[in-house]
Image (tube, helix red, strand yellow):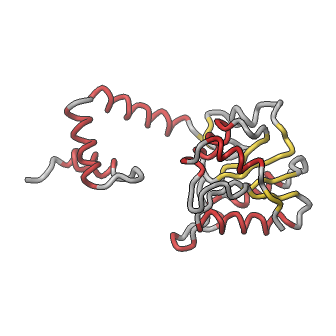
Amino acid sequence: MKNPPSLDQLISALKVLPGVGPKSAQRMAFHLLQRDQAGADRLARALDRALANLTHCERCNTFSETPLCNLCAEPARNQHQLCIVEMPADLLMLEQARCYDGLYFVLMGRLSPIDGIGPKDVNLDKLMVRALDGVVEEVIIATNFTAEGEVTAHMIAELLKDRGLAVSRIARGMPVGGELEYVDSGTLAQALYERRQLG
């Protein structure tokens, strides 16, 4: 028996989520349609609102509903430090650790030549403009300790080393192959405090 086309489309749409395969997508679709239609409606409306209202912050590239996100608009933050992270979830983890009061730049990914993700795909051109604005004095690279995160960190360090900026990398208190989003705040804070100069 074949599913109705609208059910197949829903299942297919749910499979775009990370870690969701065909069986999980099917279970989610059945749950939303049979057990939680109000939740399905909230989800659909929230996605519509997010797609309509969210854009990228002009300075740090994270998601925002305004030209400047609330962190970039906060005058009390240290304007001379710029911490580079891969994803907005990494920025949130650093904020929860309460170990950093500077500003951020969110790459929205990491270099991965195998997957065809190059410098333009992770906003390195926008990062260079931001880092070389004449205000930033130190760039802290806080990409993940995965192979792709290390390649990304190396490329950024090479681009910035000769531009008069202090460039550091968070310390390896982070587990090798680990991602910031999943690390406890104490480990993350220690890694930031023990960052090392690059180059």
- Name the residue at 81% across, 35% down: 77
Q: Residue furthest top?
A: 38
Q: Position of residue 130 (x, y in %)?
A: 79, 51
- Name the residue at 71% across, 51% down: 191
Q: In which quadrant of the rendered view does residue 120 lie?
A: bottom right
Query: Quick check: 18 left or right of 86?
Result: left
Which quadrant of the rendered structure holds the C terminus? bottom right
Q: Position of residue 17 (x, y in %)?
A: 40, 50
- Name the residue at 23% across, 50% down: 8
Number of disc labels = 0
Q: Residue furthest left?
A: 1
- Name the residue at 20% across, 49% down: 5
Q: Position of residue 96 (x, y in %)?
A: 64, 36
Query: Quick check: 65 left or right of 7?
Result: right
Query: Quick check: 181 left or right of 85?
Result: left
Q: Is residue 180 above or below residue 39?
A: below
Q: Is residue 70 above or below residue 105?
A: above
Q: Position of residue 12 (x, y in %)?
A: 30, 52
Compare residues 88 and 193 and report the one nearer the observer.
193
Q: Residue furthest bottom?
A: 114
Compare residues 145 and 194 and report the one nearer the observer.
194
